[in-house]
Image (cartoon, helix red, strand yellow):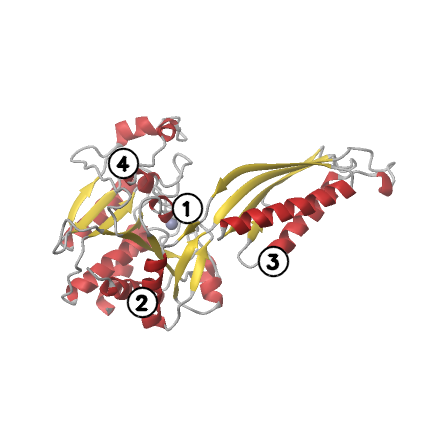
């Protein structure tokens, strides 16, 4: 295990050096560094005896056929792309941990009774075309044709980039559909602080939170700040302050709910004018869709009361909504058993961030393992997971793989 862990950490450092920018880490969809990282992963998969292939969109796959190549495969994987000025664990850890677990099984002389496919997705973060999961939506037939028309910063459409920068030479087609996959399991850093707070190295993911995004606009009346008596004012900013604090209180009182006002605009925005209009964004997430909808309605009701009592108008506009993904009960139970054998804990956490499992859950059962990361820091160059915690994550995956029947 020690030698295998050292190799995993060395590989993380190695991938962390492959960047399109010499001073910081960045690998976006079909960029030279993204492809170089994919080639590197292909090399490691081939060393492990996997049959390797790539798609024209830069996603790569290694296959261990096992004794029954026609049986439904178990998919492992994560993403090769990064955000701008990224850390070296988000995505890469899932790929390297999966490789390490498979190498450990080989060294122990264990052949799994089903095929394993390791997938390195070319795009999860969606940096280049502001659209997430291009890799995992691609292999599951969920690419909306409209995404092909999206433009990158240079004004090139995704279709053009794929045609001109795509990895066409020797490319394969990979397609998974409902019923032909045993499951998808991914290791990822937590990107939050809960494991650090409860002092545990890893946990199982119960699901990926559903999310509502809103734009809330309060309209009152702009008047003179010196001449308008306090009791006659219809101040849109003080009402918004009350609404934002009500949002925070609701989220503090309700387990599982996280709510954030991240952006606020005040009009007319003068120091001596009473604010007439205030707009703010609301990001509202919960692991259970019905609860998210119920709590959002409760919040809307209390914000309506606040605005009515202050004689303001309220525009409560839903901008975007994503349903929660519930991890598969069977895979999650098996992962919890494996976690318990390694750490003694069966802790489960809901993921606040999205992952490739969101796309893959449309065709296959999904399970995930989180590894603790320092201070919950992610999408940041100081992102860090300790070798000891990475080792725990790999051992959980090894135990899990060994426990699966044919
Ligand atoms: Zn990620």
Outermost residue toward the bottom in this view: 344
Q: Is residue 137 visible?
A: yes
Q: Which residue is mark 4?
A: 57
Mark seen at residue 338: 2
Percent x, y of residue 24: 38, 46
First-in-chain label (1 vs 4): 4
Q: Which residue is mark 3?
A: 252
Which element type, helix, strand or loop, lies under badge 1? loop
Outermost residue toward the left in this view: 67
Q: Work out whether 6 lies above or below 262.
A: below
Q: Which residue is mark 1?
A: 85
Which element type, helix, strand or loop, lies under badge 4? loop
Report crowding for label 2: few under 14, some 14 to 19, many 20 or more residues within 10 A (C-alpha). many
| Mark 4 → mark 3, Cα distance in angstroms | 43 Å
Q: Quadrant of the C terminus?
A: bottom left
Q: Give the quarter of the image for residue 328.
A: bottom left
Mark seen at residue 74: none
| Mark 2 → mark 3, Cα distance in angstroms | 32 Å
Q: Give the quarter of the image for residue 31.
A: top left
First-in-chain label (2 vs 3): 3
Q: Nearer the viewer, mark 3 or mark 1?
A: 3
Report crowding for label 4: few under 14, some 14 to 19, many 20 or more residues within 10 A (C-alpha). many
Residue at disc 1, CB closer than 8 Å to ligand 1: no
Q: Give the quarter of the image for residue 399.
A: bottom left
Mark 4 in CB contact with mark 3 (< 8 angstroms): no
First-in-chain label (2 vs 4): 4
Q: Nearer the viewer, mark 1 or mark 4?
A: 4
Q: Nearer the viewer, mark 4 or mark 3?
A: 3
């Amino acid at each position: 295990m020690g030698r295998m862990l050292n190799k995993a950490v060395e590989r993380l450092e190695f991938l962390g050096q492959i960047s399109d920018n010499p001073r910081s880490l960045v690998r976006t969809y079909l960029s030279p560094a993204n492809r170089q990282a994919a080639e590197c992963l292909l090399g490691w998969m081939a060393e492990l005896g996997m049959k390797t292939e790539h798609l024209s969109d830069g996603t790569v796959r290694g296959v261990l056929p096992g004794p029954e190549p026609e049986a439904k495969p178990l998919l492992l994987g994560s993403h090769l792309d990064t955000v701008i000025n990224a850390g070296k664990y988000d995505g890469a850890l899932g790929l390297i941990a999966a490789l390490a677990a498979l190498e450990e099984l080989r060294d122990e002389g264990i052949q799994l009774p089903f095929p394993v496919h390791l997938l390195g997705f070319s795009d999860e973060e969606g940096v280049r075309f502001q659209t997430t999961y291009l890799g995992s939506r691609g292999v599951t037939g969920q690419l909306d044709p409209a995404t092909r028309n999206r433009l990158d910063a240079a004004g090139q459409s995704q279709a053009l980039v794929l045609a001109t920068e795509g990895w066409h030479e020797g490319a394969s087609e990979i397609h998974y559909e409902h019923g032909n996959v045993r499951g998808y399991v991914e290791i990822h850093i937590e990107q939050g602080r809960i494991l650090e707070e409860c002092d545990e190295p890893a946990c199982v993911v119960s699901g990926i939170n559903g999310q509502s995004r809103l734009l809330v606009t309060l309209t009152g009346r702009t008047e003179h700040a010196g001449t308008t008596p306090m009791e006659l004012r219809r101040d849109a900013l003080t009402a918004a302050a009350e609404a934002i604090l009500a949002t925070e209180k609701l989220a503090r009182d309700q387990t599982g709910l996280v709510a954030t006002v991240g952006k606020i605009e005040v009009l007319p925005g003068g120091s001596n004018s009473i604010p007439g209009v205030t707009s703010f964004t609301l990001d509202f997430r919960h692991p259970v869709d019905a609860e998210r909808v119920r709590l959002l309605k409760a919040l809307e009701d209390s914000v309506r009361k606040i605005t009515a009592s202050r004689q303001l108008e309220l525009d409560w506009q839903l901008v975007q909504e994503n349903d929660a993904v519930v991890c598969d009960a069977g895979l999650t139970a098996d992962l919890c058993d494996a976690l318990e054998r390694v750490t003694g804990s069966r802790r489960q956490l809901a993921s606040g961030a999205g992952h490739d499992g969101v796309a893959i859950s449309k065709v296959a059962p999904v399970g995930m393992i989180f590894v603790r990361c320092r201070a919950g820091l992610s999408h940041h160059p100081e992102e860090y997971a300790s070798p000891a915690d990475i080792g725990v994550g790999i051992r959980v995956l090894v135990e899990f793989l060994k426990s699966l029947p044919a």
